[in-house]
Amino acid sequence: MPTLYAATALYGVLTPQANTTVEPELALLMPPGHGTITARLTSTCPDMNERLTDYFRAINATTSQFANAPLTAVGFACTGASYLVGTQAEAEATATFAATRGIPLVTAGQAIARALVTLGARRIAVASPYGDRLTASALAYWQAQGFTITQVARIAENTTAFHPIYAHSADHARAATRSLLEDPQADAIVLLGTGLPTLPALMASAGARRPVLSSNFCLAWALAHPAADRTSLIAWLTGSHWHDRLRATLG
């Protein structure tokens, strides 16, 4: 059933409680007729890694916030949780969700993997805004899916701001992207984290020899294009529908 601002599809998005990046980036990325509504993943655990695991366990409860909204699919916009629980638990959770609720659940991690496979990219250079434990979990996650890590650019956590990851500026993502694009072994560059602002970096590298992907970019594409066709992904990478929006937003 279409709604006024989502005549083609309406997606429910689950995002961590303090994440300030998912909603604006998905709003810029979604093509006309595709809309999103958001539910916040919450936890009282003081440790960030424990909170991320809580978010994963609460997927069904958080999705219930949408009640009977006519959703086409649900996106789990929290890559850190996927890295900690691993690919098997992630796959089991998404399969169970689809079977019980009748609509797909797509995690940002699965969306990145789908984009990489669609591009034929097996060797990836990654930028990580995480601490040591979460970075190690992220690398293990990608390696478990058969990807080879050629280089890792670490973006130091901002320990003085409201959140060590979400407070990063787009300049950090751009700087990491520039350094990784010099890696001759990488088939693609992946900027980790749904809380890291990445769209300016993706726009700046649209004509690069190696595609640059990010969590929110891939999640938006995977939700809007469940068939995962290469033509749509290439069009998104070149910014056929979102570059002008981003320029207007940034001024």
Image (tube, helix red, strand yellow):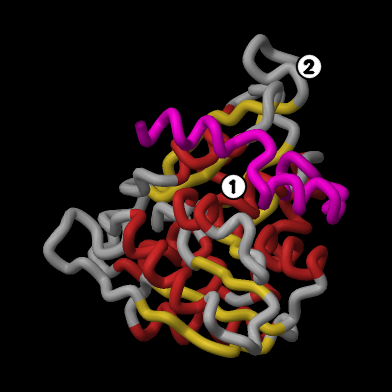
Dividing the image into 4 quarters, which one contains the C terminus? Answer: top left
Q: Main secondary structure of the magenta part?
A: helix
The residue pinned by badge 2 equals 1
Residue 27 shows in the view: no
| Residues in magenta, as a range | 222-251
Q: Is residue 184 above or below residue 161?
A: below
Name the residue nearer the viewer: 26 or 169: 169
Q: Which kind of residue does numbered mark 2 sit on?
A: Met
The residue pinned by badge 1 equals 60
* Residues packed near mark 1 inside 10 Å, few (<14), some (14 to 19) or many (20 plus): few
Q: Is residue 129 above or below residue 66?
A: below
Q: Could you say which quadrant of the image residue 11 lies in?
A: top right
Q: Residue at x 55, y 59 (%)?
A: 205
Dividing the image into 4 quarters, which one contains the N terminus? Answer: top right
Q: Which kind of residue does numbered mark 1 sit on?
A: Asn
Residue 235 part of the magenta-drawn span: yes
Residue 163 image position (x, y, % from top left): 24, 58
